[in-house]
Amino acid sequence: MKFFVDSADVAAIAELNDLGMVDGVTTNPSIILKSGRDIMEVTKEICSIVSGPVSAEVVSLTADEMIAEGRKLAEIAPNITVKVPLTWDGLKACKVLSGEGKMVNVTLCFSVNQALVAAKAGATFISPFIGRLDDINLDGLELISDIRDVYDNYGFETQILAASIRTANHVAQCALIGADVMTAPPAVIKGLASHVLTDKGLDQFVKDWAKTGQKIL
C-alpha cells in the first residue's frame, strides 16, 4: 500500500520522505489555510521534494471553472494531481482533465455509487473518507471494502485512496482490505511505529543493560 502524506507542512513531509515513507502528498483548502502559505508556492515546494503524485484541489463549483483551475494547478509540476469534488460538475471536470492526460483525484466520496461513477469518469484516484463516515456512525472501512470489490469485479483502474484516516487501526485495516493508497497526517504515519509492548520491552532492556556496567561506545 502506498503512503500519501495529508499535509502542507514541508518540514514534516521532507522528514518522512527521507525515510522512504512518502509515495505522494494530498492537500485541500483546509490544509492550505493551516499552512498559512500561498497555494502555488507551497505546492511547488512540495513537488520539488516528492516525486510521487501531489494533489492540489480546485475551489470552484462549476465544471468550466474547475477545468480552468485544474489546468492552472497542473502547470505547477508534472506530478500534480488535480483534486476535484465528487459532484456532477466535478465528474465533468474529471472527464475533461483526465482526457487531457492529467491525473485526477476525485474527493469527498461517501458511497459505492459515487466511487463507481468516478471510475467511469476516468478518475486516477477515488478518495473515500473513512473518519467522516465513522463520525456519523457508519462504517468507513466497510466502504473501502465494498469499493474494492466493485472495482475488482469490473477491472476499473482507478486507485482507492483511503482518506480521513485517524488511527493506526484504519491504516492496518485498509492494508488488509487492499486499498491502493492511504493518506494520513504526519503524526498518524509516525505513530504506526509505536506499540506499548515495544516501549515496555525497550525500557527493560535499557535497565538490564545499565546493570551490566558495560558500554559499546
Image: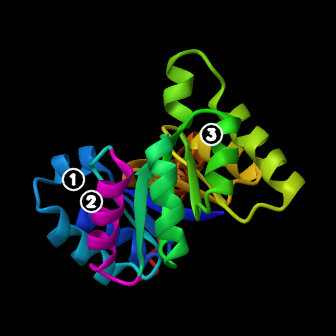
Q: Is residue 16 left or right of residue 3?
A: left
Q: Residue at x 69, y 41 (%)?
A: 144
Label 2 amino acid?
Ala
Q: Is residue 88 left or right of residue 46?
A: right
Q: Does the segment drawn in magenta span residue 4?
A: no
Q: Residue 138 in the image: x percent, y percent?
A: 63, 20
Q: Does the segment drawn in magenta span residue 70?
A: yes
User: Residue 157, located in which quarter of the rendered image?
Assistant: bottom right
Above or below, comparing residue 136 to residue 51 in the picture: above
Q: In the image, which disc is placed on residue 114? A: 3
Label 1 amino acid?
Ile
Q: Which residue is mark 2?
A: 8
What distance separates the C-alpha of mark 3 from that of mark 2? 27 Å
Q: Is residue 148 left or right of residue 88?
A: right
Q: Secondary structure at mark 2?
A: loop
Q: Which residue is mark 1?
A: 32
Q: Quadrant of the C terminus?
A: bottom left
User: Residue 200, located in which quarter of the rendered image?
Assistant: top right
